[in-house]
Image: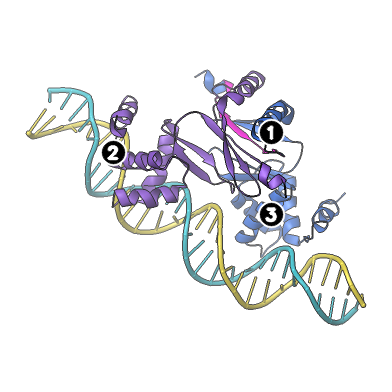
Chain colours: A blue, B purple, C yellow, D cyan
Amino acid sequence: MTCSARYAPQLRARGFRMTPQRLTILHVLHHEGTHLSPLNVFKKAVQELPGLTEPTVYRTLEFLAQNGLVRSSHDGSGHLTYEIAAADHHHIVCRICKAEIEVEHSLLAPLYQTLEAASGFTNIDSHVTFFGVCPNCQRQ
Amino acid sequence: MTCSARYAPQLRARGFRMTPQRLTILHVLHHEGTHLSPLNVFKKAVQELPGLTEPTVYRTLEFLAQNGLVRSSHDGSGHLTYEIAAADHHHIVCRICKAEIEVEHSLLAPLYQTLEAASGFTNIDSHVTFFGVCPNCQRQ
DNA sequence: AATGTTGTTGCAAGAATTTGCAATAAGGAC
DNA sequence: GTCCTTATTGCAAATTCTTGCAACAACATT
C-alpha cells in the first residue's frame, strides 16, 4: 500500500487535502524511521521535491502531528523533533551522552488512568520524553 | 533570606559565580511565580538590569536549569519555558483551550521507579508536561 | 587591598522558526 | 472535462534563538 493511498483518506475525511509536499514529508519520515529535526526533514525532502520551502515544512509537520500522522517529541535541548506515527511509545534520553531508548506505552498506561482520575482531564495521550542517566554513563 | 544569600552558595560550591545577571533572572522568575518564555524573561529582566542581553538570558536560563535553580517545561507549541524551582510538580495542558493544572510529583513517583527498573537508566527526574482535554472543554 | 585565574558577559553575526498575504492547486460539483 | 471553492503553498520579512570570541568581572589567594 502506497503512502498516498494510506494517508490521503485520513486527511480528506477531515476536509483536508493530500499534496505533494505532505506526501514527500511523510515519505521522508517513513523512510527514515526515527525522529528528525524540522530542518533535517527539509533538507531531505527538498531533494525529493525541489522548490519545497522551509515554512511549508514547519507548518506541515505541525499539521501532521495535530492529525496524528506524525508524532512530535523533544530532543535533549528542548527542540522539537518528528517521527512517523507508529507503535505508541515514549523515549528516555541520557542527560549526559544523549543515548536514547524507547519505552512501550503499556508501562505508562496505568499512570495515564491515575492522572485522568486525579485531574478530570481526559484523552491524555502525550508522547513523553524522559531524561535520566544511561547505564553506560553511570559507570563513569 | 535574600535571593543572593540563598542561591550564591549553591553556585559557588560548584565553582560557579553569582552575578547581577543571574540574580536578576532568578528574581524575575521568583517574582513571577509561573513559567515564562525566554523572551519574556528577557523583557522583564532588562528593565531591572539595563544592558542585559538576550544571549545572556538564554544561556543563563539553561545554566540555571542544569543546576536545579530553575525548571524547564514545554508550552503547547513545544517551546521551552522556565519557572523558579519549587515543589516538584508536573503539568497537564488542555489541548483545546490551553488551560493548565499542576500535578504533584508523588503521582509519578511509582512510574519513575518502574521506568528505572525496566530501562536501566537512573536519576530520571524529568519535569513532564502532559496534554489532554480539560473538564470544561469536554462539555462542548 | 592588590593580584591572578577563569567563569561570564556583551557584541555581532548567523541560523532556525514564525507570520502575513497573494498566488496556486486539490478535489467536489456539475 | 470544466468550473468553483477554499485549503495550501511560496515568497519575503520579521522574530526568536544560537554561536564565536574578545573584553570583563567574581572571588579565591596572598
Residue that label 3 marks: A63
Evaluate whether residue B81 shows in this view.
Answer: yes
Amino acid type, callout 1: Glu
Closer to the camera, A43 or A107? Answer: A107
Closer to the camera, B128 or A49? Answer: B128
Q: Over which residues does the magenta segment extend? A: A123-135
The mark closer to the camera, 3 or 1, is 1
Whether tag 3 and tag 1 are in contact, CB under 8 A, the answer is no
- For the point 41% across and 32% down, the residue is B69
Question: Picture quarter containing residue C3?
Answer: top left
The chain holding disc 1 is A
Image position of B52 (left or right of A130): left
Amino acid type, callout 2: Thr
Distance from Cα at disc 2 to Cα at disc 1 = 43 Å
Element at badge 1? helix
How crowded pointer 2 is (Cα within 10 Å; few <14, some 14-19, many 20+) is rated as few
Residue that label 1 marks: A116
Amino acid type, callout 3: Phe
Is residue A90 within the magenta segment? no
Distance from Cα at disc 3 to Cα at disc 1 = 26 Å
